[in-house]
Image (cartoon, rainbow, N blue to C red):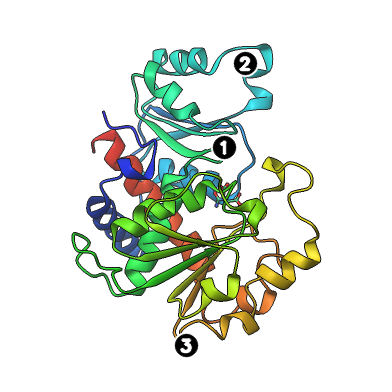
């Protein structure tokens, strides 16, 4: 029973293949007939989410399972139940898998210790967000015309991730998969939003112009204010001036550079409208691919 707790747990070539099969299937028939099963997949969402939750819900439906969405406010967490007991309860009722988003880093590992069904991490604190990194990788893999995923197919490509690196689980998981595929990864943030610990396999910088210079891919990240202590940013205007991904800054990148963002976007802060809506932007493609990657990952975890 494989859990998917970190990006390193993902069998990348297999998920890419399965995601592509789903994409083809859904392209041929966006509302495919399903064989409903009398079984649930639990989605524990203890933090806000739109796209990740919607994609996982759709993935459950496509596999014929009923998604049981539980948020912290309506669950027994509000009555003092521990995460372990919630997981034991759901497993005793026979849920086939548990997808969870949790504000605490490491919560999915805790859940996995007592679970008898696979746990899929849909984001834990500032730690990991494996399926987001997987859908970002899938989006790039398609963009670069589906090279052999067992090779270092991103070798020679520069990927700049710009924004609130310190609080970003997306950056952490992406770094694992991008480095594995051979990309040269630059992580760029204001000094107070860079992580304290060194990041192996990445170049860290405060200089967004240097990060974007000759990049093949630029990924903008949201300021994770919900995880931020006061005083980490001198001013939003200075942030925009020094770190916003806008047309002017992008002129430094390769002409064929593509722009990504995991969402939710704060238009006019980390990314300009013009860039978010440009032909260079893969943002909506990422969202579309999110469904294929979630269904592929669930299928894999369920052993189907
Ligand atoms: C991200 C998340 O929640 O980690 N969003 C997402 O899942 N697409 C990034 C964010 O919240 O900024």
State the separation of the CA atoms marked 3 and 2: 52 Å
- Where does label 3 land, which residue? 255
Label located before the other in sequence (1 or 2): 2
Label located before the other in sequence (3 or 1): 1
Is 30 left, or right, of 221 in this rendering?
Answer: left
Q: Residue at x 29, y 63 (%)?
A: 182
- Where does label 1 land, which residue? 125
Residue 166 position, x and y percent, is 58, 48
Estimate how packed mark 2 is, as few (under 14), some (14 to 19) or many (20 or more) residues with alpha carbons within 10 Å. Answer: some
Closest to the camera, between mark 3 and mark 2, is: 3
Along the line of sight, the residue nearer the viewer: 97 or 126: 126
Is residue 161 placed above or below 226 in the rendered structure? below
- Where does label 2 land, which residue? 76
Is 246 left, or right, of 211 in this rendering?
Answer: right
Q: Residue at x 33, y 32 (%)?
A: 3
Estimate how packed mark 3 is, as few (under 14), some (14 to 19) or many (20 or more) residues with alpha carbons within 10 Å. Answer: few
Closest to the camera, between mark 1 and mark 2, is: 1
Label located before the other in sequence (3 or 2): 2
Q: Secondary structure at mark 2?
A: helix
Is 121 left, or right, of 279 in this rendering?
Answer: left
Asked whether disc 3 touches disc 2, contact meaning CB atoms under 8 Å apart, the reply is: no
Location of the C terminus by quadrant is: top left
Q: Secondary structure at mark 1?
A: loop
């Amino acid at each position: 029973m494989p859990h998917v707790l970190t990006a390193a747990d993902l069998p990348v070539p297999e998920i890419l293949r399965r995601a592509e099969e789903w994409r083809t299937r859904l392209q041929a028939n966006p509302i495919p007939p399903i064989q409903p099963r009398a079984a649930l997949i639990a989605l524990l969402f203890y933090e806000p989410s739109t796209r990740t939750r919607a994609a996982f819900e759709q993935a459950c439906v496509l596999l014929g399972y009923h998604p049981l969405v539980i948020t912290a406010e309506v669950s027994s967490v509000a009555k003092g139940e521990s995460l372990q007991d919630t997981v034991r309860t759901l497993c005793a009722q026979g849920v086939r898998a548990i997808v969870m988003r949790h504000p605490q880093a490491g919560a999915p590992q805790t859940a996995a210790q007592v679970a008898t069904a696979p746990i899929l991490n849909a984001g834990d604190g500032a730690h990991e967000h494996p399926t987001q990194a997987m859908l970002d990788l899938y989006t790039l893999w398609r963009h670069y015309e589906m090279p052999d995923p067992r090779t270092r197919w991103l070798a020679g490509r520069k990927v700049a991730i710009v924004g609130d690196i310190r609080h970003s689980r997306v950056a952490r998981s992406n770094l694992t998969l991008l480095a594995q595929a051979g990309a040269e990864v630059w992580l760029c943030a204001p000094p107070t939003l860079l992580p304290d610990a060194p990041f192996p396999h990445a170049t860290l910088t405060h200089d967004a112009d240097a990060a974007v210079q000759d990049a093949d891919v630029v990924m903008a990240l949201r300021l994770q204010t919900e995880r931020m202590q006061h005083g980490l940013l001198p001013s939003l205007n200075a942030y925009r001036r020094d770190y916003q991904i806008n047309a002017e800054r992008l002129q430094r990148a390769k002409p064929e550079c593509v722009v990504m963002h995991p969402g939710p976007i704060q238009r006019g802060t980390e990314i300009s409208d013009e860039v978010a809506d440009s032909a260079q932007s893969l943002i909506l493609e990422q969202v579309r691919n999110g469904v294929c990657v979630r269904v592929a990952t669930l299928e894999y975890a369920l052993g189907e």
